[in-house]
Image (cartoon, rainbow, N blue to C red):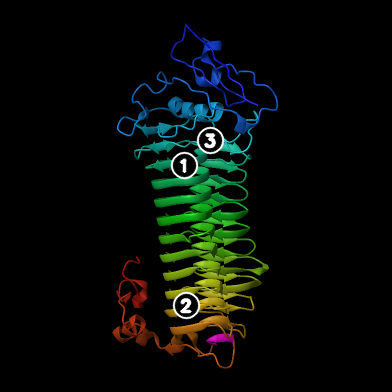
Amino acid sequence: MRFAKILSVASLPMFLFACSDSNGSGNFGNNPGAETPEEEKKDSIPENILDEDLKPITRDYSMIWKNGDGSATDPYLISNEEELISLAFYVNDSSMTFKDKFFKLTADIALTKAWKPIGVYGQNADGVGNRPFSGTFDGASKTISGMTVSDTSAYTGLFGLARNAHISNVVIKGAKMNVGSIGGVLAGLADTVTVENCSIENAEIQGADHVGGLVGEAKYVTVSNVSVTGTVGGTNNVGGVLGSVQNGTLSNLTNKATVAGKSIVGGIVGASSSVGNESSISMVLNYGAVTGTKGDVGGVAAKISTTKIEQSGNYGAVTAGEDERGGAGGVVAVASSKSSMNEVFNTGAVTGTKLMAVGGVVGSLKAVKITNIFNQGEVTSTTSKLGGLVGIADADAVLESGYNSGKVSDNNNSGMVAGKANSLATMTNIYYDQTVAGTGLVIAEKMSSFVVPTGFTTEEMKAATFVATLNGSGAVWSIDPAKFGGYPSFGWAK
């Protein structure tokens, strides 16, 4: 069913109303005394009008954003709290997506009111749903402070729902959020969105499933040059930067927030997957402690499938609770299904209790190839599959060029390299520090024909000849006495 409502308002010609898409569409013309968009009276909309059957209201908002025409060269300018609130109003109440329109902050904004996100997914209290922001928002590196949200509904952030949007140069300081599922300081749900050059500082966000310091749930996104500090907490799919991502390209991300949840908890992202082309994670570093009361906890990511991770590492402590089917890893807890990793490392302590697999770099590795890896963090667990590099190397798992110099709990179920390696897994150019290992096992459980990696003394591993051994015909590895205790590392790694 479709309908149209046209109002002619001689006293206020700046507003032109066309077809409506909202159960709560505002109308200054029906309420001439209204000073803000929120005070406008609501049009009456017949019952049983489906959201997808409605069209957005077209409004003249020249009195709200007095400067600019919304073009790329002359964007709408936002300089205060009311102008930012107005953007949320027009998107949420009137279903104005602002596709092909541009906004830019011109001043720091201190929010004094409880924040209502820009964009709605599903239905809000007024029955309004699926109102995305689809424009371009440039924060111009101005600071948004005082953002508070105490609302356990889903899809919460500065933007509740951003779709086909571009968001850049946003700085949010001191946000305090107690939310439901799919919550992030910048956005709850980002769908087909580019996010770049954003900073989340001293945030406190606590939610349910799919919670991130930047974005709660991301689909078909490109996210680059982002940093997060503060605390991030949730239940499942919790990440310092993103709670979960599907079909994402992530690069140059840094997390220094502490991250805590129940399961699928990662320093950068909780879970990464892809439909079709693989997701990509590159140049990301985690410094924050990552804790899960159950399993699947990783310094960079908890779980990856059809995802490539390159030039990334973890410095934070990784701690997982009891889950006999879960895992923990300094970089990734569980890696499977056409994923790959190259130039990755861990220096943080990895601790697990009664887990399926715990590894200094990866907990469980299945049909995944990893090249150029090292671990220096201590690995401790009561698990049955515990390894300095990987807990379990399963199916066609491949490890090439790397070493472990971190201490591993010495028991019959642990190994300096792996807790378990099946007959199809292969390890080439993989080594361990035999000075640290002592009398401990190299691979706790293996087929009798499996070629066991070679051990070197600490002194030998810090020599130029060992770097040459790791490099083979390449030039990935180098030694800087001031980094990583003088062991081999990568030039880009800090």
Residue 16 rendering spot, x and y as whole percentages? 48, 16
Closest to the camera, between mark 1 and mark 2, is 1
* Residue 325 drawn above or below residue 409: above
Q: CA distance from mark 3 to mark 2?
A: 47 Å
Asked if residue 168 is positioned above or below residue 30 in the image, the reply reads below
The amino acid sitting under disc 1 is Asn
Which residue is identified by label 2?
Answer: 406
Task: State the quadrant of the N terminus.
Answer: top right
> Of 328 and 473, which appears nearest the observer?
473
Mark 3 or 2, closer to the camera = 3
Magenta region: which residues?
441-445
Whether the residues at callouts 3 and 2 have beta carbons within 8 Å, the answer is no
Side of 492 relative to 93 (left or right): left
Spot occupied by residue 165 in the image (x, y as percentages of width and height): 44, 41
Give the mark toward the camera: 1 or 3: 1
- Up-down: is 416 above or below 124? below
- Which residue, given by chain and number where applicable, does mark 1 sit on? 164
Residue 256 appears in view? no
Label 1: which secondary element: strand
Count up the numbered dots: 3
| Element at label 2 | loop
Q: Amino acid at mark 3?
A: Gly
Q: Where is residue 111 shown, x and y percent of the image?
A: 47, 31
Residue 119's tag is: 3
Confirm whether residue 146 shows in the render. Answer: yes
> Quick one: SS at disc 3?
loop
Residue density around tag 1, few if under 14, some if 14–19, many if 20 or more, within 10 Å: some
Dominant secondary structure, magenta = strand
Instruction: Work out which residue is located at the far front of the displayed protein and give it.
Output: 1
Q: Residue at x 56, y 80 (%)?
A: 409
Distance, label 1 to label 2, CA atoms, is: 45 Å
